[in-house]
Amino acid sequence: MSLNRAERMIFDYLQAHPEERHHWLHKVQTAAAGAADDQVAAVRLEAELWGYFEERSAVASPFREAARRDGLRRTSMKNLAEYLLRLWTAPRAKKPGAEASRDE
């Protein structure tokens, strides 16, 4: 999966900060449990990840430096949201009939 610069920055930050990673692990798992499917959960998480990027850009390195250098133009966090869902949640069962409809 290819992450943009902002997504990679968040992912690396979460890897380096266990308390933040734990917080987001819980957030991702809760979003997945409360959504009809992973696409719905990813849309919800994408918005929250952008909010997190904005919040961190006011107080934490390397976000602060990136915001100073590039500004805070809205950037998609969809790939990161989908990646975290795959990484931190169990795969969902296939819906009945999904295989049959592909074979037709």
Image (cartoon, rainbow, N blue to C red):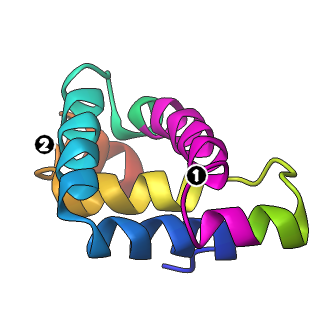
Q: Going 49% across and 29% down the picture, which residue do you hit?
A: 44
- In 3D space, how far apart are the residues under numbered discs 2 and 1 (Cα atoms)? 40 Å
Closer to the camera, 81 or 90?
A: 81
Q: Is residue 52 magenta?
A: yes
Closer to the camera, 84 or 101?
A: 84
Is residue 20 shown left or right of residue 83? left
Q: Is residue 69 above or below residue 74?
A: below
Residue 104 visible in this rendered orientation of the protein: no
Earlier residue among tags 2 and 1:
1
Label 2 crowd (10 A; few <14 / some 14-19 / many >=20): few
Label 2 residue SS: loop
Label 1 residue SS: loop
Q: Quadrant of the rendered structure where residue 32 is?
A: top left
Label 1 crowd (10 A; few <14 / some 14-19 / many >=20): few
Q: Is residue 81 magenta?
A: no
Report the span colored magenta: 42-65
Mark 2 vs mark 1: in front: 1
Q: Is residue 59 above or below residue 9?
A: above
Residue 15 placed where, x, y %?
A: 29, 73
Closer to the camera, 66 or 31?
A: 66
Q: Going 49% across and 60% down the picture, which residue do you hit?
A: 80
User: Hey, what amino acid is under mark 1?
Assistant: Val
Q: Which residue is mark 2?
A: 93
In the picture as drawn, the residue positioned furthest to the front comes out as 59
Query: Looking at the image, do the residues carrying marks 2 and 1 touch, with CB atoms under 8 Å apart?
Result: no
User: Hey, what amino acid is under mark 2?
Assistant: Ala
Residue 94 placed where, x, y %?
A: 19, 43
Residue 64 placed where, x, y %?
A: 68, 63
Q: Main secondary structure of the magenta part?
A: helix
Q: Going 57% across and 66% down the picture, which residue do you hit?
A: 7
Is residue 89 shown left or right of residue 32? left
Disc assigned to residue 59: 1
